[in-house]
Amino acid sequence: MDIVVCMKQVPDTTEVEIDREKGTLKREGVDAKTNLYDLYALELAQQIKERHGGTVTVVSMGPPQAQVMISEAYALGADRGILLSDRAFAGADTLATATALACALQKLGRPDLILVGMQTSDGDTAQVGPALAELLGLPHVAYVKELVDINPTSGVLTVVADMSDTVETLQVTMPALLTCSKEVCQPRLPSYLLKKATRQKAVEIWSAADISGESDMRGWFGLNGSPTRVEKVFPPSFDQSKETWSGAPAELAARLAGKLREMKIA
Ligand SMILES: Cc1cc2nc3c(=O)[nH]c(=O)nc-3n(C[C@H](O)[C@H](O)[C@H](O)COP(=O)(O)OP(=O)(O)OC[C@H]3O[C@@H](n4cnc5c(N)ncnc54)[C@H](O)[C@@H]3O)c2cc1C
């Protein structure tokens, strides 16, 4: 089974500044680490490979220093690592990020399974995985917390997804994409022997031209392919206050209509 794991290098800090002029994140001089959820996706890929055979390829889009993350993935068992790195990718929003990853996966040939983290610790949108699946025309399941079964003959995966208000057991036929939560497995520690054996193993660097090919999506990279602009970054506020009403249906309906008008919804 050929598996691609998408991994992102994120700032090793919770205090990332925004360049207000460009609407991009200021990453210069900030230490970087592998996005935590992506380590769970990589571990799941390794476990599937160990059980069913095949290969694990890591694909990342980022600056040249993200090669370090891919070298670390080699020490965790990844067979191949590709870094999409080019100035043309700079300023990418989630759509342009998914577009570049989709072009790279088209170039690689369709893998059986694509695993991504549930979300990142910097952008934190959880959009890239589902967008990538849509661009490739593949089914996906988000927030997977358990891989129950793989049927190698039919290609059907049975997974449990935690959608926060419901937990669902779902079946999806490969090729497919899963976004992984931290419950899906326990990442292993890097192997000293593998680290030593893969020390010289090169990371393939692909430019925008390398992944453009004949794809309809070519050119929609970086700021060019990004319809969004970051205006402001702030933690969302949730109003979880509740009211319980009781009474006759007509009285409740009139009260609800009044409340909707008060909230300027109706
Ligand atoms: C207008 C705009 C400009 C931006 N400019 C920049 C910029 O100049 N530089 C910059 O670094 N960021 C920039 N960003 C942020 C960047 O768009 C996001 O970091 C990126 O799209 C991933 O989104 P996310 O972090 O929310 O990932 P999520 O959707 O939360 O990630 C889910 C999963 O998708 C996969 N994934 C996500 N990103 C990557 C990646 N790059 N490579 C491989 N797999 C990945 C991982 O498996 C990850 O766990 C910009 C955002 C906007 C809106």
Image (cartoon, rainbow, N blue to C red):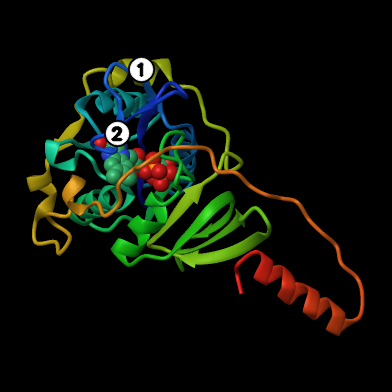
**In what element is the residue under mark 1?**
loop
Query: Disc number at residue 20?
Result: 2
For the residues marked 2 and 1, what is the alpha-carbon distance in whole angstroms? 21 Å
Residue located 29% across and 33% down the image: 20
For discs 2 and 1, the disc positioned in front in the rendered view: 2
146 relative position to 206: left or right: right
Residue located 46% across and 41% down the image: 124
| Disc 2 residue crowd, few under 14, some 14–19, many 20+, Cα 10 Å | few
224 relative position to 17: left or right: left
Q: Residue furthest toward the right?
A: 247
Residue 94 seen in the figure = yes
Q: Position of residue 209 (x, y in %)?
A: 7, 47
Residue type pointed to by label 1: Asp
Query: Disc number at residue 143?
Result: none
Query: Disc number at residue 31?
Result: 1
Disc with the residue nearer the chain's start (2 vs 1): 2
Q: Image height check: is 260 above or below 77?
A: below
Residue located 12% across and 45% down the image: 208
Q: Position of residue 106 (x, y in %)?
A: 21, 57
